[in-house]
Image: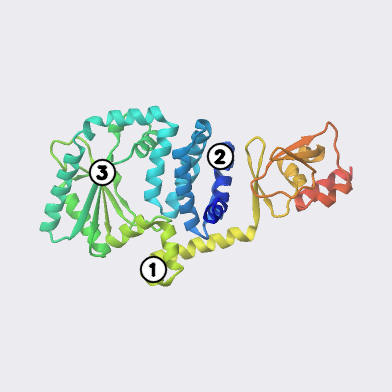
Amino acid sequence: MTASQVASDRSNQPFKLWLDVMSFVNVTPRNKEKLTDYFFGKCAGSPEIFFDFLLFLKKALVSGEDEQKTCRIASQYLEIISPLCEKFGMYEEKNLLDEMCFQITHPKDCEDIQRTLEKYRANSEETIANIIQIISKFLKEEGYDCEIKGRYKNAYRIFRKLKKKGYDVPLSLHDILAFRIILNENNNYACFDVLNILHDRFSPIAERFKDYITIPKINGYQSIHTCLNHVVHDLDLPVEVQIRTHIMDEFSERGMASHWLYSSNEKTKLLTQTEKKLLQHFSALSKEAKKEENLYCFSIGGDVYSLPLGATALDFAYSVHTDIGNRAQRVLINDLPQTIGYKIQEGDRIQVIIGEEDHVTKDRLKYAQCPSTRKKIYENTRR
Protein backbone atom coordinates (compact mmCIF):
# COMPACT_ATOMS: atom_id res chain seq x y z
CA MET A 1 0.00 0.00 0.00
CA THR A 2 1.38 3.42 -0.97
CA ALA A 3 1.77 6.33 1.42
CA SER A 4 -1.15 8.14 -0.24
CA GLN A 5 -3.35 5.05 0.13
CA VAL A 6 -2.45 4.79 3.83
CA ALA A 7 -3.29 8.48 4.34
CA SER A 8 -6.58 8.04 2.48
CA ASP A 9 -7.47 4.98 4.57
CA ARG A 10 -6.80 6.89 7.78
CA SER A 11 -8.90 9.85 6.67
CA ASN A 12 -11.76 7.46 5.90
CA GLN A 13 -11.64 5.73 9.30
CA PRO A 14 -14.37 7.87 10.94
CA PHE A 15 -16.52 7.44 7.82
CA LYS A 16 -16.23 3.66 8.04
CA LEU A 17 -17.29 3.86 11.69
CA TRP A 18 -20.24 6.08 10.75
CA LEU A 19 -21.40 3.57 8.13
CA ASP A 20 -21.11 0.75 10.68
CA VAL A 21 -23.19 2.82 13.09
CA MET A 22 -25.84 3.42 10.41
CA SER A 23 -26.03 -0.30 9.61
CA PHE A 24 -26.14 -1.35 13.26
CA VAL A 25 -28.45 1.06 15.10
CA ASN A 26 -32.19 0.40 15.39
CA VAL A 27 -34.51 2.99 13.88
CA THR A 28 -36.49 4.37 16.82
CA PRO A 29 -37.47 8.01 17.56
CA ARG A 30 -34.95 8.11 20.44
CA ASN A 31 -32.10 6.66 18.38
CA LYS A 32 -32.94 8.91 15.45
CA GLU A 33 -32.65 11.98 17.68
CA LYS A 34 -29.39 10.74 19.22
CA LEU A 35 -27.82 9.94 15.84
CA THR A 36 -28.88 13.29 14.41
CA ASP A 37 -27.12 15.00 17.34
CA TYR A 38 -24.12 12.71 16.82
CA PHE A 39 -23.59 13.49 13.12
CA PHE A 40 -24.42 17.18 13.48
CA GLY A 41 -22.01 17.53 16.39
CA LYS A 42 -19.23 15.90 14.35
CA CYS A 43 -19.74 18.15 11.32
CA ALA A 44 -21.23 21.49 12.43
CA GLY A 45 -17.79 23.00 13.02
CA SER A 46 -16.41 21.74 9.69
CA PRO A 47 -19.23 21.15 7.18
CA GLU A 48 -16.74 20.05 4.52
CA ILE A 49 -16.34 16.85 6.57
CA PHE A 50 -20.04 16.18 6.08
CA PHE A 51 -19.66 16.80 2.34
CA ASP A 52 -16.75 14.31 2.17
CA PHE A 53 -18.83 11.78 4.10
CA LEU A 54 -21.63 12.06 1.52
CA LEU A 55 -19.13 11.22 -1.23
CA PHE A 56 -17.85 8.26 0.80
CA LEU A 57 -21.42 7.12 1.43
CA LYS A 58 -22.26 7.27 -2.26
CA LYS A 59 -19.28 5.06 -3.15
CA ALA A 60 -20.23 2.60 -0.41
CA LEU A 61 -23.79 2.33 -1.73
CA VAL A 62 -22.62 1.80 -5.31
CA SER A 63 -20.09 -0.88 -4.38
CA GLY A 64 -22.09 -2.46 -1.53
CA GLU A 65 -21.69 -6.24 -1.61
CA ASP A 66 -23.77 -6.99 1.49
CA GLU A 67 -27.33 -6.31 0.28
CA GLN A 68 -28.89 -6.31 3.76
CA LYS A 69 -26.29 -3.92 5.20
CA THR A 70 -26.56 -1.64 2.18
CA CYS A 71 -30.33 -1.50 2.58
CA ARG A 72 -30.03 -0.59 6.28
CA ILE A 73 -27.51 2.16 5.50
CA ALA A 74 -29.77 3.52 2.75
CA SER A 75 -32.74 3.50 5.13
CA GLN A 76 -30.80 5.31 7.85
CA TYR A 77 -29.60 7.83 5.27
CA LEU A 78 -33.19 8.73 4.36
CA GLU A 79 -34.20 8.98 8.03
CA ILE A 80 -31.20 10.88 9.44
CA ILE A 81 -28.61 12.06 6.91
CA SER A 82 -30.98 13.41 4.26
CA PRO A 83 -32.56 15.98 6.64
CA LEU A 84 -29.03 16.99 7.68
CA CYS A 85 -28.16 17.57 4.01
CA GLU A 86 -30.95 20.13 3.93
CA LYS A 87 -29.79 21.62 7.21
CA PHE A 88 -26.30 22.09 5.76
CA GLY A 89 -27.73 23.38 2.46
CA MET A 90 -26.29 20.56 0.32
CA TYR A 91 -29.26 20.11 -1.99
CA GLU A 92 -27.49 18.69 -5.03
CA GLU A 93 -25.91 15.85 -3.04
CA LYS A 94 -29.18 15.31 -1.15
CA ASN A 95 -31.26 14.89 -4.32
CA LEU A 96 -28.81 12.42 -5.82
CA LEU A 97 -28.54 10.28 -2.67
CA ASP A 98 -32.26 10.52 -1.94
CA GLU A 99 -33.07 8.93 -5.29
CA MET A 100 -30.36 6.30 -4.95
CA CYS A 101 -31.42 5.26 -1.43
CA PHE A 102 -35.11 5.28 -2.34
CA GLN A 103 -34.45 2.81 -5.17
CA ILE A 104 -32.59 0.57 -2.71
CA THR A 105 -35.11 0.70 0.15
CA HIS A 106 -38.41 0.92 -1.78
CA PRO A 107 -37.80 -0.62 -5.22
CA LYS A 108 -41.49 -1.40 -5.85
CA ASP A 109 -42.75 2.05 -4.80
CA CYS A 110 -40.05 3.66 -6.93
CA GLU A 111 -41.02 1.54 -9.93
CA ASP A 112 -44.74 2.27 -9.44
CA ILE A 113 -44.17 6.03 -9.37
CA GLN A 114 -41.94 5.91 -12.44
CA ARG A 115 -44.54 3.85 -14.32
CA THR A 116 -47.36 6.22 -13.37
CA LEU A 117 -45.41 9.19 -14.68
CA GLU A 118 -44.37 7.51 -17.92
CA LYS A 119 -47.04 9.11 -20.09
CA TYR A 120 -45.83 12.53 -18.97
CA ARG A 121 -42.14 11.69 -19.11
CA ALA A 122 -42.48 10.50 -22.71
CA ASN A 123 -43.06 14.10 -23.78
CA SER A 124 -41.32 15.71 -20.82
CA GLU A 125 -38.54 17.42 -22.74
CA GLU A 126 -41.02 18.98 -25.15
CA THR A 127 -43.38 19.98 -22.32
CA ILE A 128 -40.62 21.52 -20.20
CA ALA A 129 -39.13 23.36 -23.19
CA ASN A 130 -42.58 24.69 -24.12
CA ILE A 131 -43.25 26.03 -20.61
CA ILE A 132 -39.80 27.62 -20.41
CA GLN A 133 -40.40 29.31 -23.77
CA ILE A 134 -43.80 30.65 -22.68
CA ILE A 135 -42.53 32.08 -19.38
CA SER A 136 -39.28 33.41 -20.92
CA LYS A 137 -41.15 35.21 -23.69
CA PHE A 138 -43.45 37.29 -21.54
CA LEU A 139 -40.81 37.97 -18.84
CA LYS A 140 -38.49 39.25 -21.57
CA GLU A 141 -41.31 41.46 -22.83
CA GLU A 142 -41.60 42.82 -19.27
CA GLY A 143 -37.88 43.61 -19.27
CA TYR A 144 -36.57 40.84 -17.00
CA ASP A 145 -33.23 39.18 -17.71
CA CYS A 146 -33.38 35.67 -16.26
CA GLU A 147 -32.55 32.00 -16.66
CA ILE A 148 -35.30 29.39 -16.40
CA LYS A 149 -34.76 25.72 -15.56
CA GLY A 150 -37.39 22.98 -15.53
CA ARG A 151 -37.62 19.34 -14.48
CA TYR A 152 -39.84 16.61 -13.12
CA LYS A 153 -39.30 16.08 -9.40
CA ASN A 154 -37.52 12.88 -8.45
CA ALA A 155 -39.41 9.78 -7.39
CA TYR A 156 -38.43 10.01 -3.71
CA ARG A 157 -39.77 13.55 -3.30
CA ILE A 158 -43.03 12.46 -4.91
CA PHE A 159 -43.17 9.39 -2.62
CA ARG A 160 -42.70 11.52 0.50
CA LYS A 161 -45.44 13.93 -0.52
CA LEU A 162 -47.79 11.04 -1.26
CA LYS A 163 -47.23 9.68 2.26
CA LYS A 164 -47.52 13.09 3.89
CA LYS A 165 -50.78 13.97 2.15
CA GLY A 166 -52.27 10.47 2.22
CA TYR A 167 -52.55 10.18 -1.56
CA ASP A 168 -52.22 6.96 -3.54
CA VAL A 169 -51.57 8.37 -7.00
CA PRO A 170 -48.73 10.80 -7.88
CA LEU A 171 -51.02 12.78 -10.17
CA SER A 172 -52.95 13.91 -7.08
CA LEU A 173 -49.97 16.09 -6.18
CA HIS A 174 -49.70 19.72 -7.24
CA ASP A 175 -46.00 20.01 -7.96
CA ILE A 176 -44.62 17.13 -9.97
CA LEU A 177 -43.36 19.64 -12.54
CA ALA A 178 -40.96 22.18 -11.05
CA PHE A 179 -39.41 25.29 -12.62
CA ARG A 180 -36.86 27.74 -11.34
CA ILE A 181 -36.69 31.37 -12.45
CA ILE A 182 -33.26 32.84 -11.67
CA LEU A 183 -33.07 36.61 -12.00
CA ASN A 184 -29.69 37.98 -13.04
CA GLU A 185 -30.29 41.18 -11.08
CA ASN A 186 -29.79 40.72 -7.35
CA ASN A 187 -32.92 42.58 -6.34
CA ASN A 188 -35.28 40.88 -3.90
CA TYR A 189 -38.16 43.14 -4.88
CA ALA A 190 -37.85 42.00 -8.51
CA CYS A 191 -38.73 38.47 -7.37
CA PHE A 192 -42.07 39.72 -6.05
CA ASP A 193 -42.67 41.69 -9.25
CA VAL A 194 -42.17 38.49 -11.27
CA LEU A 195 -44.50 36.66 -8.88
CA ASN A 196 -47.25 39.23 -9.52
CA ILE A 197 -46.79 38.91 -13.28
CA LEU A 198 -47.10 35.10 -13.08
CA HIS A 199 -50.23 35.34 -10.92
CA ASP A 200 -51.78 37.80 -13.36
CA ARG A 201 -51.07 35.58 -16.36
CA PHE A 202 -51.95 32.17 -14.93
CA SER A 203 -54.13 30.63 -12.21
CA PRO A 204 -52.21 30.41 -8.91
CA ILE A 205 -53.05 27.86 -6.22
CA ALA A 206 -53.20 30.08 -3.13
CA GLU A 207 -52.38 27.45 -0.52
CA ARG A 208 -49.17 26.51 -2.34
CA PHE A 209 -47.56 29.96 -1.99
CA LYS A 210 -44.48 30.18 0.24
CA ASP A 211 -42.25 33.19 0.86
CA TYR A 212 -38.75 32.10 1.90
CA ILE A 213 -37.25 35.46 0.93
CA THR A 214 -38.89 37.48 3.68
CA ILE A 215 -38.45 34.59 6.15
CA PRO A 216 -35.56 32.33 4.99
CA LYS A 217 -35.25 28.71 6.08
CA ILE A 218 -32.95 27.97 9.03
CA ASN A 219 -30.16 26.98 6.61
CA GLY A 220 -30.35 30.36 4.85
CA TYR A 221 -32.32 29.15 1.82
CA GLN A 222 -34.21 31.95 0.09
CA SER A 223 -36.77 31.71 -2.72
CA ILE A 224 -40.43 32.31 -3.52
CA HIS A 225 -42.51 29.21 -4.25
CA THR A 226 -45.82 29.29 -6.09
CA CYS A 227 -47.94 26.79 -8.03
CA LEU A 228 -49.72 27.59 -11.30
CA ASN A 229 -52.51 26.07 -13.34
CA HIS A 230 -53.13 26.49 -17.09
CA VAL A 231 -49.57 27.41 -18.05
CA VAL A 232 -50.02 25.21 -21.13
CA HIS A 233 -53.56 24.62 -22.37
CA ASP A 234 -53.15 20.87 -23.01
CA LEU A 235 -51.28 20.09 -19.75
CA ASP A 236 -53.47 18.65 -16.99
CA LEU A 237 -50.83 19.12 -14.28
CA PRO A 238 -50.10 22.25 -12.22
CA VAL A 239 -46.49 23.40 -12.16
CA GLU A 240 -44.41 24.60 -9.23
CA VAL A 241 -42.36 27.72 -9.86
CA GLN A 242 -39.50 28.95 -7.68
CA ILE A 243 -38.34 32.56 -8.09
CA ARG A 244 -34.97 33.68 -6.79
CA THR A 245 -32.01 35.92 -7.55
CA HIS A 246 -28.69 34.68 -8.91
CA ILE A 247 -27.07 35.04 -5.46
CA MET A 248 -29.88 33.06 -3.81
CA ASP A 249 -29.47 30.30 -6.37
CA GLU A 250 -25.69 30.15 -5.87
CA PHE A 251 -26.20 29.96 -2.13
CA SER A 252 -28.60 27.04 -2.57
CA GLU A 253 -26.39 25.15 -5.00
CA ARG A 254 -22.99 25.65 -3.38
CA GLY A 255 -23.89 24.17 -0.02
CA MET A 256 -22.52 24.81 3.47
CA ALA A 257 -19.22 22.98 2.89
CA SER A 258 -18.12 25.38 0.18
CA HIS A 259 -19.33 28.37 2.22
CA TRP A 260 -17.08 27.17 5.03
CA LEU A 261 -14.10 26.77 2.70
CA TYR A 262 -14.68 30.28 1.37
CA SER A 263 -14.79 31.68 4.90
CA SER A 264 -11.52 30.02 5.90
CA ASN A 265 -9.37 31.58 3.17
CA GLU A 266 -8.86 34.82 1.29
CA LYS A 267 -12.20 34.46 -0.52
CA THR A 268 -14.18 35.46 2.58
CA LYS A 269 -15.11 38.74 0.91
CA LEU A 270 -17.09 36.80 -1.73
CA LEU A 271 -19.59 35.61 0.90
CA THR A 272 -22.85 37.48 1.36
CA GLN A 273 -23.92 38.78 4.78
CA THR A 274 -26.53 36.01 4.95
CA GLU A 275 -23.86 33.36 4.36
CA LYS A 276 -21.53 34.88 6.94
CA LYS A 277 -24.30 34.95 9.56
CA LEU A 278 -25.19 31.36 8.77
CA LEU A 279 -21.58 30.24 9.16
CA GLN A 280 -21.38 32.06 12.49
CA HIS A 281 -24.55 30.25 13.56
CA PHE A 282 -23.15 26.80 12.72
CA SER A 283 -19.81 27.67 14.34
CA ALA A 284 -21.59 28.64 17.57
CA LEU A 285 -23.58 25.38 17.53
CA SER A 286 -20.36 23.43 17.04
CA LYS A 287 -18.70 25.13 20.01
CA GLU A 288 -21.70 24.35 22.18
CA ALA A 289 -21.56 20.69 21.14
CA LYS A 290 -17.84 20.50 21.96
CA LYS A 291 -18.44 21.92 25.42
CA GLU A 292 -20.49 18.86 26.30
CA GLU A 293 -17.55 16.56 25.40
CA ASN A 294 -19.70 13.46 25.13
CA LEU A 295 -18.87 10.22 23.37
CA TYR A 296 -21.37 7.94 21.68
CA CYS A 297 -21.51 4.21 22.22
CA PHE A 298 -24.05 1.50 21.45
CA SER A 299 -25.77 -1.37 23.17
CA ILE A 300 -25.52 -4.80 21.59
CA GLY A 301 -29.21 -4.41 20.75
CA GLY A 302 -28.54 -1.35 18.58
CA ASP A 303 -29.50 1.53 20.88
CA VAL A 304 -27.50 4.78 21.10
CA TYR A 305 -26.05 6.13 24.35
CA SER A 306 -24.27 9.42 24.99
CA LEU A 307 -21.84 9.47 27.94
CA PRO A 308 -19.19 11.92 29.21
CA LEU A 309 -15.59 11.41 28.10
CA GLY A 310 -13.84 9.00 30.44
CA ALA A 311 -17.01 7.02 31.18
CA THR A 312 -16.55 3.35 32.01
CA ALA A 313 -18.43 0.18 31.14
CA LEU A 314 -20.01 0.38 34.63
CA ASP A 315 -21.32 3.88 33.83
CA PHE A 316 -22.82 2.47 30.66
CA ALA A 317 -24.50 -0.37 32.56
CA TYR A 318 -26.14 2.08 34.96
CA SER A 319 -27.22 4.35 32.09
CA VAL A 320 -29.12 1.40 30.60
CA HIS A 321 -30.89 0.58 33.89
CA THR A 322 -30.05 0.70 37.59
CA ASP A 323 -30.71 -3.03 37.93
CA ILE A 324 -28.28 -3.77 35.06
CA GLY A 325 -25.59 -1.69 36.80
CA ASN A 326 -26.20 -3.38 40.15
CA ARG A 327 -25.90 -6.88 38.66
CA ALA A 328 -23.12 -6.19 36.13
CA GLN A 329 -20.22 -8.65 36.35
CA ARG A 330 -18.24 -8.02 33.18
CA VAL A 331 -18.74 -6.75 29.64
CA LEU A 332 -18.08 -7.61 26.03
CA ILE A 333 -16.73 -4.65 24.07
CA ASN A 334 -16.97 -5.18 20.32
CA ASP A 335 -17.31 -8.93 21.12
CA LEU A 336 -14.13 -8.94 23.25
CA PRO A 337 -14.23 -9.54 27.06
CA GLN A 338 -13.41 -6.56 29.29
CA THR A 339 -13.81 -5.57 32.94
CA ILE A 340 -16.47 -3.15 34.20
CA GLY A 341 -13.70 -0.56 34.66
CA TYR A 342 -13.01 -0.44 30.91
CA LYS A 343 -12.85 3.14 29.56
CA ILE A 344 -15.38 3.43 26.75
CA GLN A 345 -14.18 4.55 23.32
CA GLU A 346 -16.20 6.31 20.63
CA GLY A 347 -18.28 3.81 18.67
CA ASP A 348 -17.91 0.88 21.08
CA ARG A 349 -20.63 -1.78 21.03
CA ILE A 350 -21.23 -2.94 24.57
CA GLN A 351 -22.89 -6.03 26.02
CA VAL A 352 -23.22 -6.17 29.80
CA ILE A 353 -22.99 -9.65 31.35
CA ILE A 354 -25.09 -9.73 34.52
CA GLY A 355 -25.42 -12.15 37.44
CA GLU A 356 -28.49 -13.28 39.30
CA GLU A 357 -27.54 -11.28 42.42
CA ASP A 358 -26.56 -7.63 42.97
CA HIS A 359 -22.80 -6.99 42.99
CA VAL A 360 -22.92 -3.51 44.49
CA THR A 361 -20.07 -2.63 46.89
CA LYS A 362 -18.33 0.63 47.73
CA ASP A 363 -15.27 -0.80 46.02
CA ARG A 364 -17.08 -0.23 42.71
CA LEU A 365 -16.92 3.54 43.21
CA LYS A 366 -13.42 3.51 41.73
CA TYR A 367 -14.94 2.43 38.40
CA ALA A 368 -17.64 5.11 38.44
CA GLN A 369 -16.86 8.31 36.51
CA CYS A 370 -20.41 9.67 36.18
CA PRO A 371 -22.01 11.41 39.20
CA SER A 372 -25.26 9.56 38.50
CA THR A 373 -23.44 6.21 38.75
CA ARG A 374 -21.80 7.13 42.05
CA LYS A 375 -25.13 8.29 43.44
CA LYS A 376 -26.80 4.96 42.56
CA ILE A 377 -23.94 2.97 44.13
CA TYR A 378 -24.14 5.05 47.35
CA GLU A 379 -27.91 4.52 47.49
CA ASN A 380 -27.60 0.77 47.09
CA THR A 381 -24.74 0.29 49.60
CA ARG A 382 -26.65 2.18 52.32
CA ARG A 383 -29.51 -0.33 52.34
Q: Is residue 13 left or right of residue 259?
A: right
Residue 61 image offset from top left, x and y in percent: 46, 39
> Could you say where residue 147 lies in the image, as x and y percent from the top left?
21, 55
Left of 312 or right of it: where is 161?
Answer: left
When the figure is inspected, residue 65 is found, relative to residue 279, above or below; the finding is: above
Determine the image quadrant of residue 215: bottom left
Q: Quadrant of residue 204?
A: top left
Name the front one of labels 2 and 3. 3
263, 166: nearer the viewer: 263
Q: Is residue 149 left or right of residue 324?
A: left
Q: Which residue is mark 3?
A: 151
Q: Is residue 143 at all visible to an observer of this figure?
A: yes
Label ID, residue 361? none
Quadrant the C terminus occupies: top right
Lower position in the chain sequence, tag 2 or tag 1: 2
Residue that mark 2 sits on: 29
Observer-nearest of 92 and 142: 92
The residues bearing labels 2 and 1 have C-alpha atoms spaced at a distance of: 36 Å
Q: Which residue is found at the position 38% from the left and 68% from the top? A: 273
Give residue 313's position: percent from left, percent from top.
75, 45
Distance from disc 1 to disc 3, alpha carbons, whole Å, reads 31 Å
Asked if residue 167 shows in the view, the reply is no
Q: Amino acid at mark 1?
A: Gln
Q: Amino acid at mark 2?
A: Pro
As drawn, 31 above or below 211: above
Label 2: element kind: helix
Figure check: 284 above or below 30: below
What x and y, as percent, mark residue 322? 77, 40
Residue 273: image tag: 1
Q: Are marks 2 and 1 in contact (CB under 8 Å)?
A: no
